[in-house]
Each structure stands twice: as C-alpha cells, then as structure tokens.
Image (cartoon, rainbow, N blue to C red):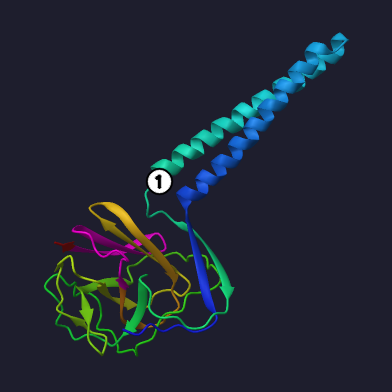
Amino acid sequence: MPHLETAPTYNRYVITTAEFLRIVALILGIIAVLLFLRSLLGARRAGKAAYYSTRREASKKAIRYLTTSLIIATIAVGIGIASIVLPPEVTSIVLQGLHARPPVKATSQPTIYMVPTLAPTAAPDTPTSAPTPSATPLTAIRKSATPVQTPAIINKYLTLRTIASAIDASGKPISSTAEFSSSVKTVYVFFDYTDVPQGVLMRQTWFLNGGSVHFDSTTWARTGSGTMYIAWSPPQGFNPGLYEVRVLLGDLRQFSANFMVH
C-alpha cells in the first residue's frame, strides 16, 4: 500500500498531560528544596547575629522561606499524584516542528487515508446510522504544523464501519472480520465521517487487554462526507489478546472498535 508524503514534512512530539504534570511537579520540587536550604542558611545566620533585632529579622525571613518551601512541596506532591491517576487517553500537548526532508517509504505508525465510498455491505457489527458518504480519491491527510484549539463538539461526526486485515487496489476492505491470527501484519479500522469541524484534533488510542499500547493524533483538515481508515502495524507484530481502538474528536469519544488476535 503506497504511503503518500510531501515535503515539507512535520515532526510531531506528543507529551501526555500526565508527563507534563510530572515535569511541573519536578520543577516545583526543586524550587521547594532550594527555598528550604535558604531557610536553613537564614536560621544559621540568625543564631550567629550579634544583636537581638538582627537575629529576630533573620529568623522571620527564615520562617518565611521555610513556610513557602513547604507550600510549594505540598503542591508538587499533589501534582505528582494527579499525574499518576490520570487516564492514558487524556488530552495531550502536541509539540510540532517543521523541516524539509525527502519522501520516505511506509512506516509502522498508523496512517490515515482517504478511500472511495464503500458499498453498504459491511460486516454484521457495522453501524448503519451514518449517511451514505460520497466517493473521494485516495490521498493522505497532511497533519497541520500549528496546533489548533479544539472547537466545541456537540455531535458525533465519525461512525465505525468495519475492521479488516487487508485492502484491495481500490482501497476497500478485504475479508472484514473481528478476529485475526497472530500472523496479521496490519489492522485497518474503517469509519464514515460527516461534516467534521476543521481544526479539531482527532486522537486514536489502541488498547491490549485494557492497557494502552499505542497513541496517535492528527489535526482534521477535510470537509464534507466520506470514508476513511486508520491502520496500525506494530514493529513486533500483534500479541494475542483483546484489542480496543478508541477514536475521539477533541474530548468527545466518537466510536470504539474491538477485535481479537489469537
């Protein structure tokens, strides 16, 4: 399956909210330690001062430093605890950089493609509530270089269609199923889209037996209606177990796709 890329290419470095909170907690912890050391130094100077007024003023400053350090340390501990209990699919901070490079071959990371409209002969577990999408040519969605603030989403715009392990030359799924052997190389999740607000962040999280094993996101830049798929090819292959793929627009979950690998 060809993988279309154009120069310039965008590098995306995703930092989850939990990781960001841990960094903030570490910085606050360092500040608290420095203030605590400053309070110890002030207390030592207060003990050696020759005059009572000087000792009293130095003691007050040492107490202020100590109190401030304790408050900051408490905040740091609270932020650290919050970073541990956050779920893996919370909003991520995306840092994107731009540099030019020549086109590369297909990688193992999930890639989003535009495909022709599928005939309404999906697998039994395929939802049928979405309008019939119009045909669109095969083309890759280019990810935006500038983070865009997510607009408010009040409706569902994406609807699961089917799951497959292969596609034909026209980009349609082959042998739609929800059970695969451990030799499967790539899993494709097809879905319909209708009037998705431009600039919204679409996120996909892949789970194995309830634990997150992969995350990716892209900024939506298409209009109208159609059919697309996301695909993932793990470098080490699919381990046996129950998989779940959750797709969100902004903070609103659009659909979940489940499949089994034996």
Corner quadrant of residue 181: bottom left
Q: Nearer the viewer, residue 249 or 103?
A: 103
Write down the region rendered in magenta.
231-259
Residue at image point 44% right, 56% down? 91
Does residue 185 belong to the magenta stretch?
no
Residue at image point 41% right, 42% down? 84
Q: Is residue 84 above or below residue 71?
A: below
- Local SS, label 1: loop
Type of the residue with mark 1: Leu
Residue at far front of view: 236
Does residue 241 belong to the magenta stretch?
yes
State the quadrant of the N terminus. Answer: bottom left
- The residue to which callout 1 is attached is 86
Residue at far left of view: 124
Residue at image point 32% right, 73% down? 230
Position in image of residue 139 (x %, y %) = 38, 86
